[in-house]
Amino acid sequence: MLLLTQLRGKIDSSTGQVIGRLLLVFFGCLITAVGVNAFLVPHNLLTAGVSGIALLAHYLVPSIGLGVWVLILNIPIFGLGWFMIDRQFTIWSFIGMIALSVCLEATGFLADMNILPDLYMALIVGGVIGGIGVGLTFRARASMGGTDIIAAILRRKYSMTIGTAQSIMNVIIIMVLGFQFTLEKAMASAFSIFAESWAMDKAIMGLETNKALMIITEHPREVSEGLMHRLRRGVTLLDGHGGYLGEAKQIVYCIISPRQLSLAKGIVDSIDPNSFTTVTNTVEVLGEGFKRSAI
């Protein structure tokens, strides 16, 4: 009986996580669709990846809806992805692609409203909103398909990074846009894609980047206690050896918020002015005292 209760609890928890991921994927796709239709389409601008190709195709053949173009262009890509990369990633990307197609069709009426007549304001706002939507989808450990599938295939076959694959595709579609319309439209699309990438990173990692301290000191215990007691942050002592003399050393490792950096440096300097400290930005920190993992 106890075993059945525990099993039911695990199933309920798993179902709740799946529903949460689905809702976050749909919400991210809806935000992206609003950014594209409300701000980019009225000015014939592009977004990144396969969605950008779909936009270009829609401008050339407007009788076919943007969401339909996204679906048409992605189907052969997912066909390759199903046989060449991780199945679970492909399934969740397919869900994201379907959600994006539906949301693009549902919000298509926004393209006729021309909410922001100014080209440069539209490219910034549209890029940022679209990037936030893409970032939320990634936080759900999914994607909107297209470039991500292609990049995964290229990485497996030719060791090409995702960034390289995306850059090549974006350059090609921007060049085509420049030939078809104007150079101004092409450059505006490039800036919009840059804004989208920035917003996507912020949506995935958060607006506040934490700091990681690596402190080499002759007084590791005193420095550790000072950081723990005054900053209320955990500290880890790592074993190391000096490269020149080979003597054993303990390295103090600590993650803090940006607001605590100045105080942390003061604590270390007051205990050991001759210490050696490096400060680096952390991409993401999960665990006690920091944000929880995304769904």
Image (cartoon, helix red, strand yellow):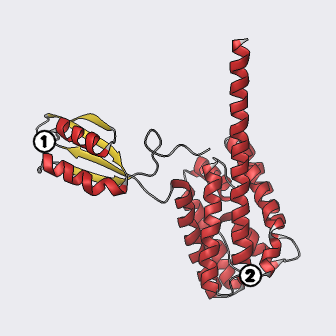
Q: Is residue 159 left or right of residue 35?
A: left
Residue 13, given in percent of the width and then of the height, sits at 68, 32
Query: At x 65% / y 67%, what residue is drawn?
Result: 130
Tell me, for residue 42, which label it has, or none: 2
In which quadrant is the N terminus drawn?
top right
Residue on which the image places disc 1: 244
Q: Which of the two residues, 224 or 152, is positioned nearer the viewer here? A: 224
In which quadrant is the C terminus drawn?
top right
Q: Which of the two residues, 257 or 154, is positioned nearer the viewer here? A: 257
- Which amino acid, mark 1? Tyr
Residue 43: in sight, yes or no? yes
Q: Earlier in the sequence, mark 1 or mark 2?
A: 2
Question: Farthest right residue?
Answer: 63
Residue 189: in sight, yes or no? no
Query: At x 20% / y 53%, what residue is drawn?
Result: 266
Residue 22, given in percent of the width and then of the height, sits at 73, 47
Residue count near mark 2 (Cα–Cα under 10 Å), binned few <14, some 14–19, many ≥20: some
Tag 1–tag 2 contact (CB < 8 Å):
no
Q: Which of the two residues, 85 or 31, is positioned nearer the viewer here? A: 31
The residue tagged with tag 1: helix, strand or loop? loop
The residue tagged with tag 2: helix, strand or loop? helix
